[in-house]
Image (cartoon, rainbow, N blue to C red):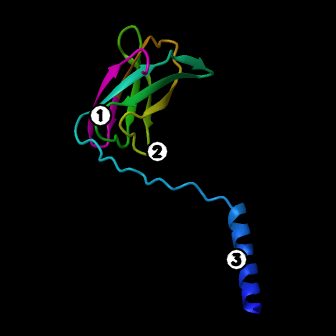
Amino acid sequence: MRHVAILSAAAFVLSASMATAQAPPPVQKAKFVPPVKGVATIEVMQMAPKRVGKDMVTVYKVRNTSKGSINLLKADEYWYDKNAKVVSGAPYAHTKAPIRPGEIVEITLVSPYNAQMKQNQVIFSHANGKIDAKAVKAMK
């Protein structure tokens, strides 16, 4: 009889502690998306460049429109004067996680300011090849 009382008390304590403890949310497995080999495609939306102190800051939103992930996205910005000579520029390397298909990332390029800056150009590439960039006015 005494064993039954001890077992029922232990069961009560266990059930009470289980009722108050919340189960953690289920862990979702990361889905591996094979990287693009060769030419990847992206959509690019450029914000207006702004002068911030001694720098010219340009922000881009980039969407991966390829079927695979893009590893190590690189962007090289070049600023030209009115005679088409390079007067400034900035590199960028996206070293965070690969950009998955459909994912949008924001890239900020900071170039040293030069009073002769008139026009900029950005060239994109990735670890496994070139990038075909399409300029868009808004991300859908």
* Type of the residue with mark 2: Lys
Residue 33 image offset from top left, x and y in percent: 33, 47
Q: Find the residue positioned furthest to the top.
A: 82
Could you tell whether 48 is left or right of 1 in the image? left
Span of residues in magenta: 124-140
Residue visible at 49% across and 18% down in the picture: 47
Identify the mark nearer the N-term, 3 or 2. 3
* Type of the residue with mark 3: Ala
**Residue 125 lies in the magenta stretch:** yes
- Position of the C terminus, as image quadrant, is top left
In terms of secondary structure, where does tag 1 sit?
Answer: loop
Provide the residue designation for mark 1: 66
Residue visible at 53% across and 23% down in the picture: 57
Identify the mark nearer the N-term, 1 or 2. 1
Which label lies toward us, 3 or 1?
3
Provide the residue designation for mark 2: 96
Where residue 43 sits, quadrant-wise, is: top left
Residue 19 image offset from top left, x and y in percent: 70, 63
Provide the residue designation for mark 3: 11
In terms of secondary structure, where does tag 2 sit?
Answer: loop
Tell me how far mark 3 sits from mark 1, CA to CA: 56 Å
